Amino acid sequence: MALVLSALAMSCSVSYKFNSSSIDYTKVKTITINDFPIRSSYVWGPMQTIFNNELKDIFANHTRLAQVKRNGDLKIEGEITQYNQRNKSVSSEGHSAQTELSMTVNVRFTNNIEHKDDFERQFTATASYETTQSLASVQEELVTQMVKEITDQIFNATVANW
């Protein structure tokens, strides 16, 4: 019995990636992340800065890639194309009960080492708030939440290869 368990234990191996990415650092060493301008008709000023900082931070914190201004092995660019709010649900009295914010970002990813990985894609996130609250009172928190979700989606699509 001990021999069987020993053989079974030796045949199993566990592999962990501590950097949350599947980057071949022998080939890919740099990344260029351009600032994303807002191209949406509805705008909240700080959204652009929050998004650009979070996108750069996620790559700085979860990869060993050097961020360079141009000619990176990987390149991420795009624009914030939509920022909208709409009524999500109606109360029993017929009034709006919840409002949903949504944010969409168009991303162009170029892998200068493996161009087969290149893509252009949109990423969207939503967040809701009670209409008893003002947008001004919840906007920063909800935009930060949506930005985190979108930058996670971008990170996963570009270097995590799930």
Image (cartoon, rainbow, N blue to C red):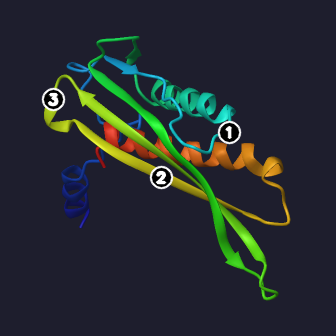
CB contact under 8 Å: marks 1 and 3 = no
- Disc 2 crowd rating (10 Å Cα; few below 14, some 14-19, many 20+) is some
Q: Position of residue 23 (x, y in %)?
A: 28, 30
The answer to whether residue 16 is visible is yes
In this view of the protein, which residue sits in the foreground, 20 or 46?
46
| Residue ID at (45%, 28%) | 59
Tell me the distance, in whole angstroms, between the alpha carbons under discs 1 and 2. Answer: 16 Å
Write down the residue under mark 3. Answer: 114
Label annotation for residue 2: none
- Residue 86 drawn above or below residue 83: below
Residue 115 relative to residue 62: left or right? left
Label annotation for residue 124: 2
| Residue ID at (41%, 27%) | 63
Whichever of callouts 1 and 3 sits on the residue coming sooner in the sequence is: 1
The answer to whether residue 23 is visible is no
Q: Position of residue 10 (x, y in %)?
A: 22, 50
Residue kind at label 1, given as amino acid type? Trp
Write down the residue under mark 1. Answer: 44
Residue 64, quarter of the rendered image:
top left
Between tags 1 and 2, which lies in front?
1
- Looking at the rendered structure, the secondary structure element under dot 1 is loop
Tell me the distance, in whole angstroms, between the alpha carbons under discs 3 and 2. Answer: 26 Å
Q: Position of residue 78 (x, y in %)?
A: 40, 33
Residue kind at label 2, given as amino acid type? Thr
| Residue ID at (51%, 29%) | 37
Tell me the distance, in whole angstroms, between the alpha carbons under discs 1 and 3. Answer: 36 Å
- Looking at the rendered structure, the secondary structure element under dot 3 is loop
- Looking at the rendered structure, the secondary structure element under dot 2 is strand
In this view of the protein, which residue sits in the foreground, 88 or 146?
88
